[in-house]
Image (cartoon, rainbow, N blue to C red):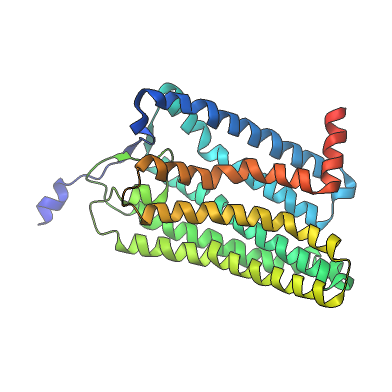
Amino acid sequence: MEAVKENISSHKYFFLDGFSELGELRPFLFIPFSFMFVVSLFANSLLVYVIVSQRSLHSPMYILIASMACIDLSLPAFFVPHMLLSFLFDWRGISLIGCLVQMYFVHLLGAFQSTLLLWMALDRYFAICTPLHYQEQMALARFLKFVIPSSIRNMFVVLVVVSLAGKLPFCLRNVINHCFCEHMALVELACGSTTINSLVGLISVFSVPVTDFFLITASYTVIFSSVLSSGKSSAKALHTCVTHIVVMTVSLTIVLTAFLSYRVRNGLPAAVRTFFSILYLFFPSCFNPIIYGIRTTEIRQHIINTLRV
């Protein structure tokens, strides 16, 4: 048995073969995805520049929005350029190490997208429910008590998921039916048991985005109850929350759709699963800066002034 095991070699190089079903039409995907990439880079860079350059926007709420823009700016950079090159020049190869590094940063930054929405919900909770203590609660030293534990959670969970994937033997195929190193797309190529990987992947979904979603929902439930029961200026108070809720709803819907597409496979083409997996990472990077720029009056006004110069 030991001799047999020694003869089995595990692949160290893979080919990203997402959207291969499109055949000669595959290169045309470069056009919409490159357009989305340019929009993401421009919109998020502009949002960060406006918030950093305007002293009036240096309050906690806007700093958190700028942090979200930094995440949305960084996330596509780890997989979109390689994906665009594969569409245009058919450059599909990636090493196992490169694949695992890409997987770690893509899933880590994806986790921070939901966690930042949680921090934004906490900011709105302190601003609306405890306005007299808002500056005290949002002071850096105090707010780090929320930031550090959730950051450690994200890094640890993603590290465990990626480490377990890296230990698998890949002795069957070395063609990943995806455009980037998505966790389940790589794991399904393993020739050993992947039960633990699937279980840990499921636990990671519930421990990060699902947990964040329930905490965010609880925060906004308390906020709405406080506004309605106190008779405050509800229109102004609720407006500050609606933008976050819109972003959260869109992000969560896409995440759950992508997650279920890999669990419910009957009759679902591989290209559809690949599309939703890309969408849940890429679409928020384009959507978030636009919705924050349009709905947040102060940011919108400063963006208009900046573009007029």
Q: Residue at x 59, y 33 (%)?
A: 37
Q: Residue at x 36, y 52 (%)?
A: 166
State how many labels appear: 0
Q: Residue at x 65, y 43 (%)?
A: 287
Relative to 29, 127 lies left or right: right
Residue 171 screen position, x and y as percent: 22, 46
Residue 44 screen position, x and y as percent: 70, 40
Q: Which image quarter holds the C terminus? A: top right
Relative to 192, 97 lies left or right: right
Direction bottom: furthest residue: 229
Residue 206 screen position, x and y as percent: 49, 66
Above or below 8: residue 61: below
Q: Which image quarter holds the N terminus? A: bottom left
Relative to 176, 230 lies left or right: right
Q: Nearer the viewer, residue 194 or 28?
A: 28
Q: Nearer the viewer, residue 162 or 185?
A: 185
Residue 224 screen position, x and y as percent: 75, 70
Relative to 2, 138 lies left or right: right
Above or below 226: residue 185: above
Above or below 173: residue 92: above
